[in-house]
Structure formats: C-alpha cells, structure tokens
Image (cartoon, rainbow, N blue to C red):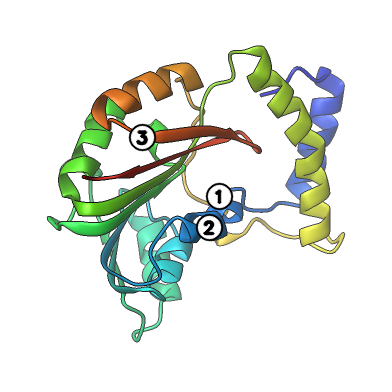
Amino acid sequence: MTSLPPRLLQALDRFNAAHPWDHNAHYHPWILRQLPHRFGSALDVGSGSGDLARLLATRADEVHGVDSDPVITSRARALTSEEAAASFTVGDALTGLPAGPHDVITCVATLHHLPFTEALDAFRRHLAPGGTLVVVGLFRPQTATDHVLGATAAPLNAATGWLKNGGRRVPRPTSMTARTRPADMPFSDITEAARTVLPGARLRRRLFWRYTLTWSRP
C-alpha cells in the first residue's frame, strides 16, 4: 500500500494488529453528512455487522442491509434491537437486492468484491429519483499521489489505533471480521467507469486507502 521500507511496514503491521480500529466506521459520520436529515427507505449493500445500517435507521423509516456472508449477517441481526428500523438479509449484491426504489443506497468496502460497472448499474436501478448513492471504496495504488497518500496514512493509522484504544491491546472489533480482499482497480479506472455509469458522480481519494463516491439520481 505504501512505499515505506519493508521492515517499517512489518513493524507497523504488528502494531496495528495490537491496536486495531475500523477504517470504514471512520467514514460513517461523513456518510451521514451526505444524506438528508430524514428519508424513507435506505439500502446498505455489504452491511456486515450492521453498524452503518443501525446509524441509518436513526434517520430512515426503514433500512435493508444485504450481505453475502450468512455468518456476519446473523451477527448483525443479533446486535440489532427489535425496535430498530433495520433488517438484514443474505443476498447477492447484483441479483438479491430489495426491489425498492430506495431513497438512499450506501456501500462501504464492498464494491471491489463485485463486478464494478454491473454493481453501479444495479445501484442506479434501485435508487429512487432524487435519491443519493454513497460509496466508500478501496483502490489499488498506482500513481505517485496514491503512494504519497499511503505513506502519509501509515503512521496516522498507527497513531489513530493507539488513541482510539487508549494505548491498550484490544481484540479486533466485530465489524472487522468480514471477509476481505485487496482492490485491483486503480483510482483513475474507477473514476472513468463510475462517470460512465453515473454521469456527474463525484469521486475523491481519501486517507486510509479509501476513496468516496457520491451521486444523486436525477
């Protein structure tokens, strides 16, 4: 992910394993800022342990979380109170989405597991007119800018883990137990493909090896 020396990267990996924190949850407040104060139906694709879906449920009439992993979906249900307006189903992100249309669709650290343009097209079709799509995704570093961001994020990542955990060694949070894989698309390809499927989409590189995409359906 970075151009830092291998020995330093290994030391950082060991430190981060002892002081883990959820990079995706770091962006949840930012996601909420992109959305209306109240909305009707929300769909969270790749909902994992349900942290974001439960946040969306504080502002939505109903939230549908969809994830392909039955184990973590079961965990999401167990962590969600009966009063919450959030439900979770096991399903395919291309063919198993609730029909909608949905006023909000979110997708965090999931899009790189899917056929990119097909997934964005599915999200577009399930989004209501005037609705908002928010994606936090992963990209493969390619340019000098990418590697500078990665090198900058590496020590910040360690410092954030230390501060969030009060300097204590802690187990990995439930939200970090979902299956992972590295991203294979560079940011330039992501931007080009996204704007083909979603004209006017806004994309930006972010710290901690993430990018964001927002789009409102006309």
**Which residue is disc 2 drawn over?**
28
Q: Residue furthest bottom?
A: 83
Whole-angstrom CA distance, mark 1 to mark 2, is 7 Å
Quadrant where the C terminus is found in the figure: top left
- Is mark 1 in CB contact (under 8 Å) with mark 2? yes
Res. 169 visible in picture? no
Q: Residue furthest top?
A: 143
Q: Amino acid type of disc 3?
A: Ala
Q: Which residue is pictured at 38% across the width and 36% down the height?
A: 111
Residue drawn at the location 38% of the way across and 56% of the way down: 47
Tell me the kind of residue under disc 1: Asn
Relative to 95, say whether 114 is above or below.
above
Q: Nearer the viewer, mark 1 or mark 2?
A: 2
Badge 3: residue crowd in 10 Å (few <14, some 14–19, many ≥20): some
List the residue tagged with mark 1.
Answer: 24
Indicate the position of residue 36 as horizontal and vertical percent values: 38, 64
Residue where numbered disc 3 is placed: 201
Q: Earlier in the sequence, mark 1 or mark 3?
A: 1
